[in-house]
Image: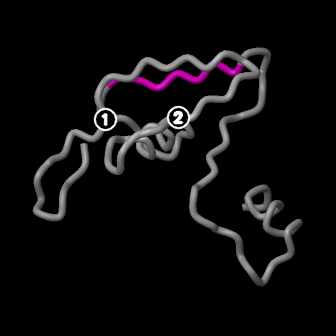
């Protein structure tokens, strides 16, 4: 649940059942405000659901979930390598 600018509670995301088999990539497509970013932030562990659960099965101890934003978030004063290494240092 999110609070709107007017203070009202907004149910942002309904029940979702999503399975992405190992080695596959999927794309979430939909209009602005339909919950794409909220779902991705939940899967990446950047948000905590108010109800239900998010289960990420890393088959064979695979890599953790990564989240890449649509907008540019590079720090222009750093080199490409330094930008890539920054999350590892943080």
Residue shown at the point (73%, 58%) measured from the top left? 87
Q: How far separated are the C-alphas under marks 2 and 1? A: 13 Å
Q: Closest to the observer: 78 or 51? A: 78
> How many numbered marks are there?
2
Q: Position of residue 43 (x, y in %)?
A: 52, 34
**Residue position marked by numbered label 2 in the rendering:** 43
**Residue position marked by numbered label 1 in the rendering:** 13
* Image: 59 above or below 89: above
Residues rendered magenta in the picture: 52-58
Q: Position of residue 59 (x, y in %)?
A: 73, 16
Q: Position of residue 48 (x, y in %)?
A: 41, 39
How many C-alpha atoms fall within 10 Å of the one at disc 2: few (<14), some, or many (≥20)? Answer: some
Apparent side of residue 45 relative to residue 30 in the rendered image (left or right): right
Residue 16 appears in which quarter of the rendering? Answer: top left
Q: Are marks 2 and 1 in contact (CB under 8 Å)?
A: no
* Image: 71 above or below 61: below
Q: Is residue 19 magenta?
A: no
Residue shown at the point (40%, 40%) measured from the top left? 30
Apparent side of residue 15 relative to residue 23 in the rendered image (left or right): left
Element class at badge 2: helix
Q: Position of residue 60 (x, y in %)?
A: 79, 15
Q: Closest to the observer: 70 or 29? A: 29
Q: Is residue 54 magenta?
A: yes
């Amino acid at each position: 649940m999110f609070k709107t600018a007017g203070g009202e509670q907004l149910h942002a995301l309904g029940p979702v059942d999503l399975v992405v088999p190992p080695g596959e990539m999927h794309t979430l497509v939909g209009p602005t405000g339909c919950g794409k970013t909220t779902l991705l932030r939940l899967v990446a562990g950047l948000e905590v659901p108010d109800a239900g659960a998010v289960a990420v099965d890393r088959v064979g101890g695979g890599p953790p979930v990564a989240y890449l934003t649509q907008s540019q978030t590079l720090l222009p004063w750093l080199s490409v390598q330094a930008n890539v290494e920054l999350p590892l240092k943080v």
